[in-house]
Image (cartoon, rainbow, N blue to C red):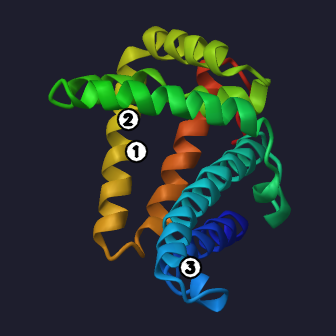
Amino acid sequence: GTAYRLGLMWNAVTALLFISLRRYIPMLFTSDPEVIEMAARFLVFVAVFIAFVSQIGMINGYLRITDGGRAELKDFFVFRNIGAALVASLIIAAASFVGALLLYVGAIFVAWATLFVLPLIIDRNLGAVDAIKASWKLVTANVAQSLLLLLVVVAASSIGSAICGVGALVTVPLAGLLTIYLYRRFTGGQVAA
């Protein structure tokens, strides 16, 4: 339990530092306002990338926990298949954007259809498109459970964020573990008791 909280906190603090200090870090190297502004915008992308990579590490740790292993802090800092995960995330983001134009119904559909894309990429070494197809097969074979999972994940994340973000230290890891638990169940894998 402590390892994933430490991993989540480390990644969250690092990303928040980049976002919070994005205007000040460039001032250590230049006083040119244009360069500072450009660097500040770049640091936002760095923070987003850190959050993205940390999600991969968190999924790796969750897989270790659900497989019955005792996760150590280092398990949350293993970043496998970043390229495929990035491509899949960009495809999902584009589809979500288009879906959001349809009164968010399409974006919700995309979130549901792609629930297991990153675990499939990290666990099974699938490419982006193959993982999207495999996720679609998993959710359509388990419609009720996967819709309920989406609802629980969104609710848990919202509640955790609503409590000044502090609640997310508990709700986000639990939502991640639940996702990986169901992923293992849906794929016929063994789940630790």
Please state, as top left, top right, bottom left or bottom right, where the N terminus lies in the image.
Answer: bottom right
Numbered mark located on residue 153 in the image: 1
Q: CA distance from mark 2 to mark 1?
A: 5 Å
Residue 116 vertical position relative to residue 64 in the rendered view, above or below: above
Q: Which residue: 54% across, 15% down? A: 138
**Element assignment for label 2:** helix
Q: Position of residue 88 (x, y in %)?
A: 59, 28
Q: Nearer the viewer, residue 155 or 77?
A: 77
Q: Nearer the viewer, residue 138 or 184?
A: 138
Count neighbours of disc 2 (C-alpha within 10 A) and say few if under 14, some if 14 to 19, many if 20 or more.
Answer: some
Q: For the residue marked with disc 1, what is the amino acid?
A: Val
Q: For the residue marked with disc 3, what is the amino acid?
A: Leu
Q: Position of residue 83 (x, y in %)?
A: 73, 34
Q: Which residue is mark 3?
A: 17
Count neighbours of disc 3 (C-alpha within 10 A) and say few if under 14, some if 14 to 19, many if 20 or more.
Answer: some
Q: Nearer the viewer, residue 192 or 53?
A: 53
Does any portion of residue 118 appear in the rendered image? yes
Quadrant of the image occupied by residue 145: top left
Count neighbours of disc 1 (C-alpha within 10 A) and say few if under 14, some if 14 to 19, many if 20 or more.
Answer: some
Q: Residue furthest left?
A: 103
Pointers 2 and 3 in contact (CB under 8 A)? no
Q: Which residue is mark 2?
A: 150
Q: Which residue: 30% across, 61% down? A: 159
Closer to the chain start, of discs 2 and 3, is 3
Give the left or right position of residue 33, taking residue 128 as reference.
left
Q: CA distance from mark 3 to mark 1?
A: 26 Å
**Element assignment for label 3:** helix
Closer to the chain start, of discs 3 and 1, is 3
Q: Which residue: 70% across, 34% down? A: 191
2 or 3: mark nearer the eye: 3
Q: Nearer the viewer, residue 172 or 26?
A: 26
